[in-house]
Image (cartoon, grey):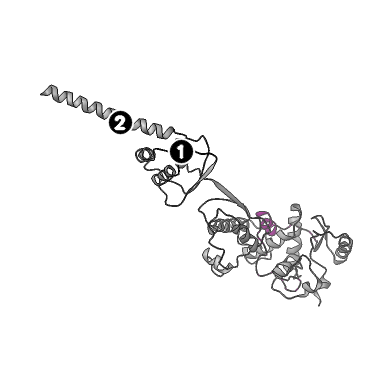
Amino acid sequence: MIRKLMMLLKGGLLLAALLVAFVFWQQHQAIQQPLHLDGERLLEVPVGSTPGGLLNRLEREGVLEGAFWLRQYWRFNLADQSLHSGEYRMRPGMTARELLELWIKGEVVQYSLTLVEGWNIRQVRTALAGEEKLKQTLTQLSDEDLMRELGEPGVHPEGRFFPDTYRYVRGMSDLDLLTQANRRLKQVLAEEWTQRAEGLPYKDPYQALIMASIIEKETGVPAERGQIAGVFVRRLSKGMRLQTDPTVIYGMGELYTGKIRRSHLREATPYNTYVINGLPPTPIAMVGREAIHAALHPEDGDSLYFVARGDGSHVFSATLEAHTRAVREFQLKRRADYRSSPAPVSKDTP
């Protein structure tokens, strides 16, 4: 009797060992199999997807076989592993194991969008709308609604986003990206404000941001940012009007067709610094750290005017007479991409 029991036990153990070996062999075969792909393909993994559901889907699509064994492999070996949503790049010759390793590492395909210094909010929104891989949630919203979605109701959106290259994955939204850009702007502005020079004519960081946006639009040569900032800060401190064309252009909005006429300089808008005193009510563009730094660290000097040479650089003058001569000289050689500058005070008069 005991002998029979021993024989049965040995037989059962052998059967169990064979079964375990069979399972490991099946899993090994499934794991090592090459994916059936004719070319590179992106596998989209929506939020809430499970490894089992993806494996079943890939089997139905003929990309792999033995989804059951692969599910068991994940269940017993990777049960605590989270699955990142996004897109995974599958290539010909890739094995099922290599695909699972991508899932384990979360190596989703990344895309990037660059927000450029000097862009206005319309350009930012157009760029976002052109990103096919971004989930579009803002296209039907007004600027006011956009800022409400960002948790800043009543805030003007211009200049509230930091120009930089932002990376995202499929499944992220345009609001997600703008949230990053908004948070980054606040961080940079706060860092620069704490290190600002003394005696600046700004009541708060927002006024510095407005000034930085004007500097951003007026600067053609990066090395001149500090000088341009110095001109504007001195004019502001002396109670002189800033008289800068980019503010006029911004105030014209879509009516601007590439040229500023004298009638435009006389037109009363909240942004026309030939008419208003002090700073315009909001920034006129996105600004980089360099422009913010320049606004908070203007170069010393006595120049109160500058005029563009037509190549991006400027001639700086301390007196109206010298500025007038420079304007006459360089406007005669004016190019299509000529950048204007603060004009003589005489233009203030109607």
- On the picture, is 316 further left or further right than 179? right
Q: Nearer the viewer, residue 306 or 130?
A: 130
Task: For label 1, count other residues whose C-alpha is less than 10 Å away and answer few (under 14), some (14-19) or many (20+).
Answer: few
Where on the picture, by quarter, is residue 132? bottom right
Give the position of the N terminus as an image quadrant: top left
Give the mark nearest the N terminus, 1 or 2. 2
Residue 287 appears in the picture as rendered: yes
**Percent position of residue 323, x then y:** 85, 64
Q: Which residues are magenta?
A: 274-302
Q: Residue furthest left?
A: 1
- Secondary structure under tag 2 reads helix
Vertical placement of residue 174 versus 20, above or below: below
Vertical placement of residue 168 versus 150, above or below: above
User: How far apart are the two marked residues, 1 and 2, measured between alpha carbons?
Assistant: 24 Å
**Percent position of residue 53, x then y:** 40, 47
Q: Residue furthest top?
A: 3
Which residue is at 71% across, 74% downward?
269
Query: To which residue does mark 2 refer?
Result: 20
Where on the picture, by quarter, is residue 198? bottom right
Q: Which mark is residue 101?
A: 1
Q: Nearer the viewer, residue 221 or 235?
A: 221
Q: Nearer the viewer, residue 73 or 246?
A: 73
Q: Nearer the viewer, residue 178 or 210?
A: 178
